[in-house]
Image (tube, rainbow, N blue to C red):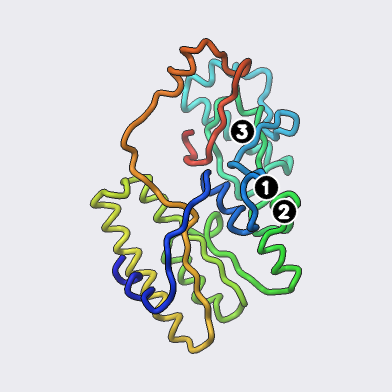
Amino acid sequence: MPNLFNMFQDGYFRSTKTLLGYSNTIIPSIFSGAYPSEHNIWGVYKMSPETSPFKVSPLIPKSVVDRSFIARYIVNRGVFRNAKKRGLLPGHFDLLNIPLELITYFDLSMKKHIIEPNSMNGTVTLFDLMREKKIPFEYLGYPWNHGTQQILELAEKQIHDTSVVFAYIDEIDHLGHQYGINSKDFLERLKLFDELLSRFLQRIMKIGEEISITIFSDHGMHDVIGTVDVKSRVDSTGLKIKNDYILRFHHRKILGI
């Protein structure tokens, strides 16, 4: 990203070490200053069958439905819709296609979006502090805004009216997963992102007000260079799912885990 690199020569930049975990673990750490071992948020889900909002009718043959990707998706839609209707899932939460045999073992690690009051179950966030100090702020990005250009345009408008604007851009993450970080497609998209963001920054710097800008990523990415068939290895031990272990899921795709 040559444009951003050249711009950053007048500021300060460095690489940082990422934390263990996905964005759903790292973002709570970024906005609380607490490590995962302290805030205990290790992903979208936590094992908690007692509080699970996901209820599957006993009339539904779980093992049979789980064999069909489409059938499981349809039932999952009903399960998620019912949980939201009962106020047990946040409205912004995406539909996931989780095996019905396992879904009732899990609850959400965070029932609120990170910007909402007391979103981390007692751990104070930056957004909690800004509310306490009456510092106005605006959050732009997933799940309410999509697309880098739209988010930057909204940020440019909001920056005149509020003290702190946080723009969460997830496009680069999706492109890395889709194409791989060394692919021609990814590098071309990265150059477009570089041009879009650098033009945004140039306009912001011309405003004439004293504005501090920080750009950071929650994690890096690495291409897949090998795979391990974990299921076959676990199956070879004789351990039985639900009796001896439970699979834990990461929030990645609406139609797959």
Which numbered disc covers residue 123?
A: 2
Question: Which numbered disc, 2 or 3, marks the residue closer to the eye?
Answer: 2
- Lateral position of residue 191 relative to residue 202, left or right: left
- At label 1, counting other C-alpha atoms closer than 10 Å, the crowd grade (few under 14, some 14-19, many 20 or more) is few
**Residue contact between numbered discs 1 and 3, judged by CB atoms under 8 Å:** no
- Cα–Cα gap, marks 2 and 3: 33 Å
Q: Secondary structure at mark 3?
A: helix
Taking the view exactly as shown, the residue that stands out farthest to the bottom is 208
| Image coords of residue 135 (percent x, y) | 69, 74
Q: Position of residue 113 (x, y in %)?
A: 64, 53
Q: Helix or strand or loop: what does disc 2 sit on?
A: loop
The reply to whether discs 1 and 2 touch (Cβ–Cβ < 8 Å) is yes
Q: Nearer the viewer, residue 109 or 74?
A: 109
Using the image, determine if residue 146 lies above or below residue 111.
below
Residue for badge 1:
38
Q: Closer to the N terminus: mark 2 or mark 3?
A: 3
Q: Is residue 19 above or below residue 239?
A: below
Residue at 63% from the left image edge and 15% from the top image edge: 243
Quadrant of residue 31 in the image? bottom right
SS state under label 1: helix
Q: Label 2: how many residues lie within 10 Å, few (<14), some (14-19) or many (20+)?
A: some
Nearest-to-viewer mark from 1 and 3: 1
Which amino acid is tagged 1? Glu
Q: Position of residue 250 (x, y in %)?
A: 53, 38
Answer with the quarter of the image where residue 172 lies: bottom left
Q: Is residue 198 left or right of residue 61?
A: left
- The tag earlier along the polypeptide, 1 or 2, is 1
Between residue 156 and residue 197, name the one nearer to us: 197
Residue at which label 3 appears: 78
For badge 2, the amino acid type reads Thr
How many residues crowd around disc 3 within 10 Å: few (fewer than 14), some, or many (20 or more)? some
